[in-house]
Amino acid sequence: MNTPTRVISFVNAAHFIDHYSMLIFAAAVIVMGPALGMAYSELLPYATPGFVAFGAGSLLTGWLGDRWSRRHMMVIFFIGIGASMIAVGLVNTRLELGAALLSIGIFASIYHPVGTAMIVSYAETLGRQMGINGVWGNLGVASSALVTGVVGQYLGWRWAFILPGFVTILIGLCFMAMVSHEDRTNAKQAAAQARVAKQDMWRVIVALLIVVIAISTTFNAVTVVLPKLFAERLTGLTRSPALLGVIAAGVYVFGAMTQYTIGKLIDRYSLKAVSLPLSFVLAPFLYIAAELSNVPLIIAAIGIVMGAFGQVTINDAMVGKYTSEEWRSRAYAVRYFVGFTAAGVSVGLVAWLYQQGGFVTMLHAFSGLCLLVIAAAIILPVEIRTPAAQSG
């Protein structure tokens, strides 16, 4: 029988790998461009199909997680995404690059609807475990910039994909050996942990859709852009790709701390009470970051990642609290389909905005988008706690 600690540990590792694998290209593109003879704005769109698949694939993978096996889907995730990373490191043509990045996105689409549903199923304190799980995903984002910068500088960009690919496959083999499939067909399904008045449910759906689209687009844009932004704006501090990766990783640590803190707050207070003050963070920091450089830019970037990563934890907890076990993977599938499809579009949007007016135009545009997050937090209704939620 699977133990919660063992399952959650593997799922947390998967969250790390999921975000790490999707963002290797964003960090490696800085050194890949000269090697392949392509400009940054020309090379970046090759990641778009993978990010679209990251979201679109979640509909099928979430359905398979509920109807077939979450454990089996996670095995496919580990092995598939590891092999795909290795494939990117072996490409020789633009077509091969696009296909390999697409493959990463397809397998990466498994994690969020399936892995997040597993977290909710095994977690005793939802907010805390969501926060910890978010930290692992955040560390994946941070480590991707750090490790890719170091490996790319000293071993070359190909090894920045190949090495983590082999490690991921090894973890997948351990998961296969240590976590078994559980048949939930005749099991009593857990109910939602919290609810709202029936007449207010439309407000939950509208708020969730608004904030998912705005935050997913901004979140993905920030994680894709940050290495390049630092490379251009931190020239007064360093020009070393490895040190830029260290700085980016340090910024993401603050996002990890925010996710853990928000997770604990969700266990104590309603989602509206936590989300409303947090919603005012992103827009102003994105706006002022447009004109900053060096240390002031690093400080603004810390505010941006704290706002973005904190909102991701709120979004995941909202679905976990308001859906029953039977439908949870499919509910997360819809949430991530909407979010990651918007995120996939953001890659092309980033390239276009960068061509139009550089980072100033880009960051101002995303600042305006994040005003919608405030509106979503305002219309979110106050939840009615169930007895199970109160005892937790």
Image (spheres, helix red, strand yellow):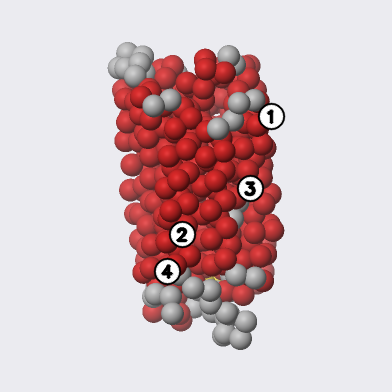
Depth check: give the residue in front, 120 or 186. Answer: 186
- Which badge, 2 or 3, comes first in the chain's sequence? 3
Q: Amino acid at mark 3?
A: Ile
- Name the element at disc 1: helix
Q: Amino acid at mark 2?
A: Leu
Residue type pointed to by label 4: Met
> As drawn, is 153 to the left or to the right of 172?
left
**Residue at 43 percent of width and 55 percent of height:** 171
State if disc 1 and disc 4 touch (CB < 8 Å): no
| CA separation in Å, label 4 and label 1 | 38 Å
Secondary element at tag 3: helix
**Disc 3 packing (10 Å; few <14; some 14–19; many ≥20):** many
The residue that appears at 57% across and 66% down in the rendered structure is: 72
The reply to whether callout 2 and callout 4 are in contact (CB within 8 Å) is: no
Query: CA–CA distance between discs 3 and 4?
Result: 25 Å
Q: Which residue is mark 2?
A: 173
Q: Nearer the viewer, mark 2 or mark 3?
A: 2
- The residue wearing badge 4 is 178
Instruction: Say if residue 323 shows up in the picture.
Output: yes
- Given the image, on which type of amino acid does mark 1 rest? Leu
Residue bearing mark 1: 95
Give the residue at x 53% y 60%.
75
> Label 2 vs label 1: CA separation?
30 Å
